[in-house]
Amino acid sequence: MNVEIHIADSHYLGYAQEICDLIYESAQARGTGIAKRSVEYISGKINDGKAVIALDEDKLVGFAYIETFSHKRFVANSGLVVHPDYRNQGLAKKIKRKIFDLSRKLYPNAKIFSITTGLAVMKMNTELGFKPVTFSELTDDTEFWKGCQGCKNFDILQRNNYKMCLCTGLLFDPDVKPVQQASSFAKKVVKPVVKRKAPNKMFKK
């Protein structure tokens, strides 16, 4: 495997249809998630430099893109997909890191969020500093939730007034500092104090 992950630009427009097909096929296999994206939509992300693409020489093996909402106060890393022949090799994690770093570079003050049913995605996000949140803490931009219309569980989201679904909400807030796992005081080794009994004194009568 000789996979390289690139920040997308106009040189990669020829992959747009293949990317759409891969996203659709992946959603069908999972039974959940965003089922379709148009060629025009994916091409726009590629042209704007808001996507990353993974290639094994000239073969498409992975993709992810950035969406912005609420006047760029919220950013979503979306459409993460890996070709079936390249799964379970750590590639998704590398793509996730690349699109996360690109999001932080382009929108350093934005909150980055994700909704997912996948345990693997939850684990990747947690390692990057995401925290589980309720949907109320995510963007209220209607354009984001319109994107869920292609998911088979969209009716569940509607019935719950867009406050709950089968997905878990995850949020990275750049203003929240990571909690240190241990303070310098806790790291010090403190030896227990052992009290010794004084020896019995013998008194002569």
Image: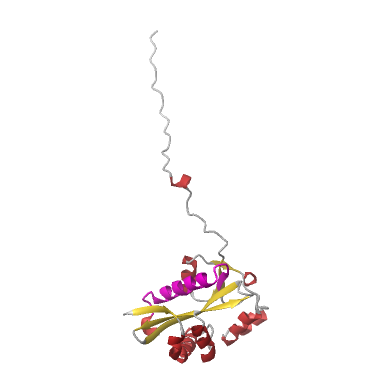
Q: Quadrant of the N terminus?
A: bottom left
Q: At 52% from the left edge and 82% from the top edge, which residue is drawn?
A: 48
Q: Between 197 and 130, which is closer to the camera in this rendering?
A: 130
Give percent across and percent down for residue 180.
49, 54
Quadrant in the rendering for residue 149? bottom right
Instruction: Describe the colour scheme in one phrase.
Output: secondary structure
Q: Is residue 122 above or below residue 49?
A: above
Horizontal relation, residue 197 to residue 113: left or right: left
Q: Is residue 132 above or below residue 95?
A: above
Specify whether residue 97 is painted magenta: yes
Q: Quadrant of the C terminus?
A: top left
Can the viewer see residue 38 in this picture? no
Q: Is residue 86 above or below residue 97?
A: below
Can the viewer see residue 179 in this picture? yes
Q: Between 72 and 188, which is closer to the camera in this rendering?
A: 72
Magenta range: 87-113
Q: Between 30 and 38, which is closer to the camera in this rendering?
A: 38
Q: At 56% from the left edge and 72% from the top edge, which residue is drawn?
A: 113
Q: At 50% from the left edge and 70% from the top edge, which residue is drawn?
A: 105
Specify whether residue 153 is painted magenta: no
Tell me how many marks there are: 0
Q: Is residue 26 above or below residue 168?
A: below
Q: Between 156 and 139, which is closer to the camera in this rendering?
A: 139
Give percent across and percent down for residue 25.
46, 89
Q: At 58% from the left edge and 77% from the top edge, which residue is drawn?
A: 68
Give percent across and percent down for residue 51.
48, 80
Give percent across and percent down for residue 45.
52, 83
